[in-house]
Amino acid sequence: MNPAWKQTKRIVTLGSTLSLLALSGCGAEIRPDGPKRVVFTDPDGNQRVVEVAPSSELRAAAVDRLIEMSADRNPQLRANAIEALAPITERVEPIVALAINDPNEGVRSVAVMVAGQRNLATLAPSIRGLAQDPSPFVRSAAYYALARFGEEVDLSELSSMLLEHSNHRVRSQAAYVLGELGERSAIPLLQQAAMTRVPMASAIERKIFRLQIAEAMYKLGHDESIDTIRAALYPSRADELEATALAVQIIGQVRDEASIDQLIFLSDPDVDQPMPAEVRLGVASSLALMGHREGAFVAMEFVSSNLDSVRAQAASVLGKTDGAENLGHLEMMFMNDRSTLARVAAAGAIVDYTQRQLARSGRND
């Protein structure tokens, strides 16, 4: 480790319209049962009740807040809350069960991706129907989840999305899903996509698309693709900083240990032109994913930023890094920050931080 580094995403209120909701799937039925319960009924008639109970403890209070925000009017907050709850399978399962029918395509997509990541296979019958969802984002997420459940999935539509869709974000998600599924046979398809013109996309949008193709190919065993990702760490123009932030994130996700020194250089605040907060915070987060959790000091520079999104990202970094004061700062943000976005991020960070503590102690509550 470089010495410089050491120094220097509701209390389920199921009343009103939601109380009328009954979802098919997960066996026979999923249904709300009062303000804080969801009932899962298996095909053989056995029932499983999942409680959403409040508590005064910080972790439980954060979980309760995230559950509350999973029904917020703002779809971004709903999606963020669901992602933040993902590490707690028994708590996120009933939230996902409801969210896969959310009116917002982004929330549905996030919920289905979480279902696949956490192997919530009891949701498979409901998710099968989403393979015909009007949204290509939701359809690609459904293919991912079903494949993760071990079901046979025709991935030809993902190929079409990757090569032909007019929206570069749809193409990017298709690439991401192929990488996550471990389909090595998709490497030639991804190489073809990297050379395919994306109509109406800007230069930076094309660069981001190629970065996400490189990420997918690297996950599938095409080691040379890491060079494309590393090259994006050094922007030649200000408008390329978005690609730099993505490259930093990808390096953490694929655990590219060989890039650690480059990441630390990007986090240095004392160079002639220091990287913006988003990149420096991304470095701390990615290094934490690789087991280097000394980066709380980076987050502390930005917990009082005037930008809500930067404070939210700083909270996320505090959740991923180690530090005796991390939880105290997160509690202050969770309780007092003026931005709901930052408060939700702080709640998710509290879950991350305490989840790691529980894992170290051998507990899973």
Image (cartoon, rainbow, N blue to C red):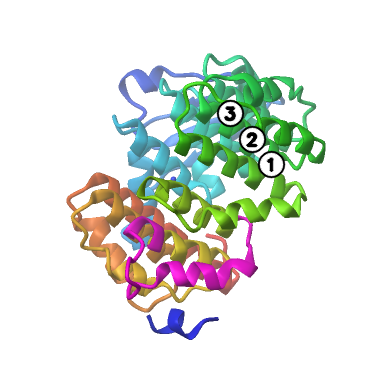
Local secondary structure at mark 2: helix
Q: Position of residue 231 (x, y in %)?
A: 57, 56
Contact? badges 3 and 2 (CB < 8 Å):
yes
Q: Which residues are magenta?
A: 253-280
Residue at image location 49% in from the left, 49% down from the top: 246
Residue type indicated by callout 2: Ala
Which mark is on residue 175? 2
Q: Is residue 273 magenta?
A: yes
Image quarter of the N terminus? bottom right
Check whether the beta carbons of the residues at disc 2 and disc 1 lie within 8 A of each other: yes
Residue 138, above or below 119: above
Query: Dot 2, how many residues are within 10 Å of its Cα: few (below 14), some (14-19), or many (20+)?
Result: many
Q: Give the numbered dot on residue 171.
A: 3
Relative to 296, 97 lies left or right: right
Q: CA distance from mark 3 to mark 2?
A: 6 Å
Q: Residue pushed farthest right?
A: 185
Q: What is the C-alpha distance between the residues marked 2 and 1?
A: 6 Å
